[in-house]
Amino acid sequence: MSRSLRAELLAWLLLPLVAVVAFNGWTLRLDATRTADLITDRTLLASARVIAEQVKESDGRVESLIPPSALEMFASPDREKVIYRVLSPSGELIAGFPDVVEPPKPPQGLEPAYYEGEFRTEPVRAVALAQPVISKVYGGNALVIVATTLHGRDRLVNEIWQNSLRDQLLLVGVAALLALLGLRRGLAPLLRLRDELRSRDPESLKALEPDRVQGELRPVIDALNHALERVRAYILLQRRFVADASHQLRTPLAVLKTQIAMARQDDDPQLRREALSAIEGGVGSMGRLVNQLLTLARAEPGGAAMRKEQLDFGTIARKAVEGLGIIAFDRNIDLSFEAPDAALPIYGHVTLLHELVVNLVDNALRHIPEGGRVAVRLASSDAGILLVVEDDGPGIPEADRERVFERFNRLAPSTVEGTGLGLAIVKEIVAAHDGAIVLMETQPPPGLRVEVRLPTADAAAKS
Ligand SMILES: Nc1ncnc2c1ncn2[C@@H]1O[C@H](COP(=O)(O)OP(=O)(O)OP(=O)(O)O)[C@@H](O)[C@H]1O
Ligand SMILES: [Mg+2]
């Protein structure tokens, strides 16, 4: 499922905000209740004081007159019930309702005590106030209790609370709107980039401009561009391979076609046989060419995924040289091979390493005059494996030693058959194994000495 960045960012912004508002709403309600209680308590105390002032002794009896103003204080649209009770110092009910809630504990001294309770199933808030009675008969305090129902208080709490909660919710709404606008503006470059990528020509691998997005997104664009660059290089490689292959195959195919047509016309069996063996030779060299092209495609960076393994370079080189013995024999060349007894561990691709040796020795065998000498030597050192292929042919002039590594580049005039891919392949293989190759003059000249250095398996593992 695809996730929306905008929704996610908005959620991360708004959910904590809603949580904060909820917490704030709760504390707000507590505060509102406290404030409303304070107001109720003031009125309760004032009313209790007015009643208390009227408690006096007359004719040896404690009496209490309830002045109307003491109850009018509570007048409100909420039809609040006001209940009171006055007890004489001896505990006798002298005014009010007998069932008014008792305070949980009697007031300390003359300090009023506030408390909550129930009066006939209705919740009430009450004050208990001690009033000293000056009398010769009685000593002590009368107790005045005034209680009121809480409709007014609850309404006040709700009003305070709801109003500010509404304001806060409004604030969250405005914040959401602003956040949405901000996100839209903030994400606009990214969305523009998406649209640009969508509407792109499928062939286009042009890099994206990193300046068009915010700094935080630049690494993403850079990585994308990097990937595009690699794709471009890979496509270029494929195109070049196809172009190379078709170019190189066109001529021999045309030649083959002519040879076949001619063979068909020839009635003389001898001539026919000759034509057929020419065709066989042509097919053989085309096979070699196809092989070379495939090797090249495989060795190139980004070419077919290379599976490297632990190998012994000595064995590979020996096999490659042995395979070329027939050419040496054919051209009467003294081909020698020298290698240390110990294994030469290398971490590499077996086919590619085989091709490396074959191409170098093949060059030496074919580019020198008949009857010459070719020596292949292997050595190992701390620096790695050293492969030397030396011949006593004409060598390669210093000015051409770079050029011969390019594809299809051959030294003119060359009477030797070939396509000029051999050294290009060698160079790619050496690079694919993190090695190095140098062409130099033999001592004494003339002749070509090729030195290839390859890291041993241990060195390759460390790097
Ligand atoms: N040992 C050598 N002695 C003299 N010249 C050489 C030697 N090796 C290579 N060259 C020169 O370098 C050129 C490039 O060699 P490369 O192996 O790339 O191509 P090639 O041998 O001509 O063709 P291919 O190997 O594709 O069949 C050769 O054409 C040849 O002129
Ligand atoms: Mg060659």
Image (cartoon, helix red, strand yellow):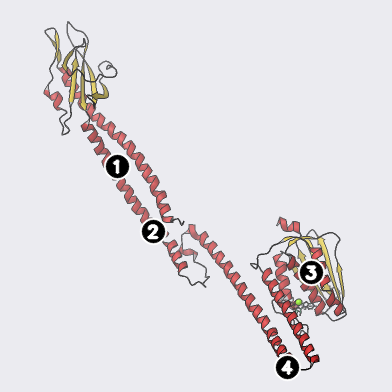
Q: Is residue 410 visible?
A: no
The kind of secondary structure element at disc 4 is helix
Instruction: Tell me: residue 263, above or below residue 234.
Output: below
Q: Disc 4 or 2, which lies upstream in sequence?
A: 2
Which-is-in-front pick, marks 4 and 1?
A: 4
Question: For mark 4, what is the residue?
Answer: 265
Asked if residue 250 lies left or right of residue 395, the reply is left
Specify few, some or many for label 3: CA neighbours under 10 Å numbering under 14, 14-19, or 20 or more.
Answer: some
Residue 26 in picture, x, y percent from top left: 33, 37
Question: For mark 2, what is the residue?
Answer: 184
Instruction: Tell me: residue 43, above or below residue 246.
Output: above
Which-is-in-front pick, marks 4 and 3?
A: 4
Specify few, some or many for label 2: CA neighbours under 10 Å numbering under 14, 14-19, or 20 or more.
Answer: few
Residues at marks 4 and 1, CA–CA distance in whole angstroms: 104 Å
Asked if residue 239 lies left or right of residue 334, the reply is left
Q: Which mark is residue 338?
A: none
Q: Nearer the viewer, residue 123 or 272?
A: 272
Q: Looking at the picture, which amino acid does disc 2 mark? A: Arg
Q: Looking at the picture, which amino acid does disc 1 mark? A: Leu
Ligand 2's quadrant is bottom right
The kind of secondary structure element at disc 2 is helix
Q: Residue at x 38, y 43 (%)?
A: 19
The kind of secondary structure element at disc 1 is helix
Evaluate if marks 4 and 2 touch, with contact meaning CB atoms under 8 Å apart: no
Q: Disc 4 or 1, which lies upstream in sequence?
A: 1
Instruction: Tell me: residue 156, above or below residue 169.
Output: above
Residue 231 in picture, x, y percent from top left: 57, 68
Which-is-in-front pick, marks 4 and 2?
A: 4
Question: For mark 1, what is the residue?
Answer: 165
